Amino acid sequence: MGEAESKAALAGVYSQGKEPRLVSVSESGHDEAWAIGDTLFIVPAIPPDASPLLEYALRVRRDATFTGSCSDCGATVGLLAFANTNNAAFNHSSISHRNNCPALDENVTPLLLEHHRERAGQTLEQQLKSATKQTRLKIESTPKDKRIPIKNVKFEKWATKFIDDHLEAASACGHLKANVAQTWNMSTGDGTWKCNECFAYYQEAVRKGEVPLSYQEEHTCDRCRKFAPPLEPMMIRIDNFFIVGAMCSPCSAESQQSPEPSQSKPRRRKGTRRGSNSRKRR
Ligand SMILES: [Zn+2]
Ligand SMILES: [Zn+2]
Ligand SMILES: [Zn+2]
């Protein structure tokens, strides 16, 4: 295919207005294949623990690849090389970013290589420790009224078992398979493990109403599995695992109870109605 044809073909891809979708992740976890329509793009994965500068540069570079123009320096798609593998149009597009653009290969590649080098020098234990810290910080950055700390040991046991069961049964995104030491996210309505990046895309799709849940599932408590609308939001973090879902009011209340109330505090009598706290927070 000549360059003019390639450009025309790519312009056609961008004008479709289709959302890019992740097709696969390389075994190393360093590269991703994305498709827009039936055209494939290969972009570097954004490492879960990238520095803010590296993350920004990779995001700008990725968006430029997916849209044909750079949001930082304004460059548009330039030289193209097409290679046809079977029927799939495999596409390498190059965008001539300006010298001071963070997405320019010469600027982003050294940062990326340095990042991979640093990570390769860490033990798995160090990587997991840092993943746990990142996950904790992620929860702490959500507004206080949206996160529900679990105070009940019995409840934590249930959560740990829930995670264990799902580690065996549920599938995980390619990023997690390539690199286990990062935050594992799950929405119970979806039931698959996702890295932060894939989880953000998933939550965006939910927000746009692209991920329909059955009415039954949407109103079933994750803990007791009772159908009990309306539910209260649930957020659980254990180590580097993060789960969002929903619970019925009794389970939610139980998660907030201290299992061994100290003698000095009066115990609430059985049957006492909860006060204004019982309002649904959905
Ligand atoms: Zn640029
Ligand atoms: Zn992922
Ligand atoms: Zn329940």
Image (spheres, grey):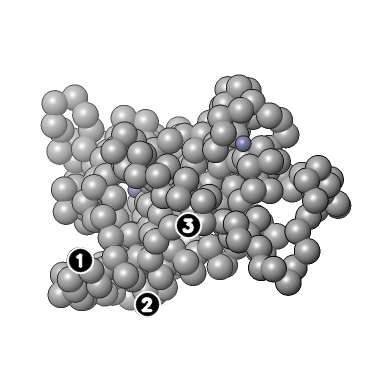
- How packed mark 3 is, by other alpha carbons closer than 10 Å (few <14, some 14-19, many 20 or more), is many
Q: Position of residue 151 (x, y in %)?
A: 58, 60
**Residue 74 visible:** no
Q: Specify which label sits upstream in the sequence, 1 or 2.
A: 2
Q: Position of residue 36 (x, y in %)?
A: 37, 36
Compared across the picture, whether 61 is left or right of 254 comes to left
| Nearer the observer, 184 or 37 | 184
Q: SS of the residue at dot 3?
A: strand
Residue at figure coordinates x 78%, y 55% from the top left = 268
User: For residue 16, what is the image quadrant?
Assistant: top left
- How packed mark 2 is, by other alpha carbons closer than 10 Å (few <14, some 14-19, many 20 or more), is few
Q: Specify which label sits upstream in the sequence, 3 or 2.
A: 2
Look at label 1 and name its amino acid: Leu
Q: Is residue 246 above or below residue 210?
A: below
Q: Specify which label sits upstream in the sequence, 3 or 1.
A: 1
Which dot marks residue 237?
A: 3
Residue at figure coordinates x 60%, y 57% from the top left = 259
| Nearer the observer, 175 or 96 | 175
Q: Check disc 1 and report the residue beneath it.
A: 124
In the picture, the quarter occupied by the C terminus is top right
Q: SS of the residue at dot 2?
A: loop
Q: CA distance from mark 1 to mark 2?
A: 36 Å
Q: CA distance from mark 3 to mark 1?
A: 20 Å
Which dot marks residue 229?
A: none
Q: Is residue 119 above or below residue 18?
A: below
Q: SS of the residue at dot 1?
A: helix
Q: How many marks?
A: 3
Q: Position of residue 134 (x, y in %)?
A: 41, 68
Q: Check disc 2 and report the residue beneath it.
A: 100
